[in-house]
Image (tube, rainbow, N blue to C red):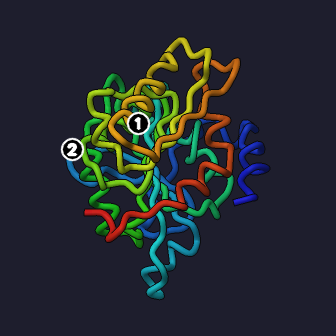
């Protein structure tokens, strides 16, 4: 994980951050990050990253790998799947093929919001077709994807080993569903797009319900872009990997 810091900084270069041409469709279980078609009609196209070991796992009966689901923000919606790699974990995985998660990063069509049924279908497909450890499924997203991270985790308690909403807003009325879900939220204190209260309110509500696994990081003098410091910090990935679901996911 120490490799993440220099590689994340390197991703500030145009070669790693600027949207490029649509990649050719990749065969199943090909190492690296490649666009994939929807798993069902009306589903989401997505980027799939496989570390080299995960790509070989089904061939040699190797170990199961942690799975991370990443949900992008409003700015990456559309039909150019390469835009999903502009921010967050897909950006890092594009620069570092050894990024140590199977990473599934779906794309929203223009003008749409995240639909939990379609996300469930994608996650179920990943569990059925990829060498995923069902006890290590992690969910994160930024801005609009951060809202959906709160919403999806609250709708299906026990589905995720840990979640990390970034610059997102949750519904405090749903917070009691998250008392047993390790949560680390991130926000800039000068965010005028999604105010920090969106994260503060969830942290307070989870703790009021008896949850003791909720963390909140507020970045001083920072606006909406809390995702660069959050995702460039190796501590986030180590924290995610420190959590498992007893008995695996459903």
Q: On the picture, is 191 further left or further right than 203?
A: right
Q: Secondary structure at mark 2?
A: helix
What is the residue that sits farthest to the bottom in this orientation? 60
Lower sequence index among marks 1 and 2: 2
Residue that mark 2 sits on: 117
Residue that mark 1 sits on: 207
The quarter in which the N terminus is drawn is: bottom right
The relative height of residue 96 versus residue 87 in the rendered view (above or below) is below
Q: Position of residue 23 (x, y in %)?
A: 52, 50
Q: Position of residue 125 (x, y in %)?
A: 29, 61
Res 144 quadrant in image = top left
Residue 168 - label: none
| Residue 82 visible here | no
What is the residue that sits farthest to the top in this orientation? 192
Q: Position of residue 95 (x, y in %)?
A: 68, 52
Q: Residue at x 76, y 38 (%)?
A: 13
Task: Pick whichever, 40 or 174, lies toward us.
Answer: 174
Q: Position of residue 140 (x, y in %)?
A: 46, 43
The relative height of residue 55 versus residue 84 in the rendered view (above or below) is below
Q: Residue at x 57, y 47 (%)?
A: 89
Q: Residue at x 29, y 46 (%)?
A: 119
Q: Residue at x 60, y 48 (%)?
A: 236
The label nearer to you, 1 versus 2, is 1
Q: On the picture, is 185 further left or further right than 238?
A: left
Q: On the picture, is 92 further left or further right than 113?
A: right
Task: Pick whichever, 233 or 93, lies toward us.
Answer: 233
The relative height of residue 16 versus residue 241 in the rendered view (above or below) is above
Dot 2 surroundings within 10 Å: few (below 14), some, or many (20 or more)? few
Task: Pick whichever, 106 or 245, lies toward us.
Answer: 245
Q: Alpha-carbon distance for marks 1 and 2?
A: 28 Å
């Amino acid at each position: 994980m120490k490799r993440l810091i220099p590689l994340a900084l390197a991703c500030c270069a145009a070669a790693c951050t600027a949207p490029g041409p649509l990649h050719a469709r990749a065969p199943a279980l090909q190492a690296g990050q490649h666009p994939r078609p929807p798993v069902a009609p009306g589903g989401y196209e997505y980027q799939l990253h496989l570390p080299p070991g995960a790509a070989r796992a089904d061939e040699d009966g190797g170990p199961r790998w942690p799975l991370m689901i990443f949900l992008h923000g409003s700015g990456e919606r559309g039909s150019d799947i390469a835009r999903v790699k502009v921010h967050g974990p897909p950006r890092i995985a594009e620069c570092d093929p050894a990024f140590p998660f199977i990473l599934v990063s779906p794309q929203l069509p223009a003008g749409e919001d995240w639909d939990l049924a379609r996300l469930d279908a994608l996650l179920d497909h990943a569990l059925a077709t990829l060498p995923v450890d069902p006890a290590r499924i992690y969910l994160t997203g930024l801005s609009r994807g951060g809202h959906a991270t709160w919403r999806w985790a609250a709708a299906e308690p026990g589905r995720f080993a840990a979640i990390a909403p970034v610059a997102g807003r949750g519904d405090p009325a749903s917070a009691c569903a998250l008392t047993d879900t390790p949560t680390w939220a991130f926000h800039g204190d000068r965010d005028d797009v999604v105010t920090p209260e969106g994260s503060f309110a969830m942290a307070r509500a989870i703790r009021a319900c008896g949850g003791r696994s909720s963390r909140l990081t507020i970045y001083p003098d920072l606006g909406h872009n809390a995702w660069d410091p959050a995702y460039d910090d190796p501590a986030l990935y180590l924290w995610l990997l420190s959590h498992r679901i007893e008995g695996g996911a459903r």
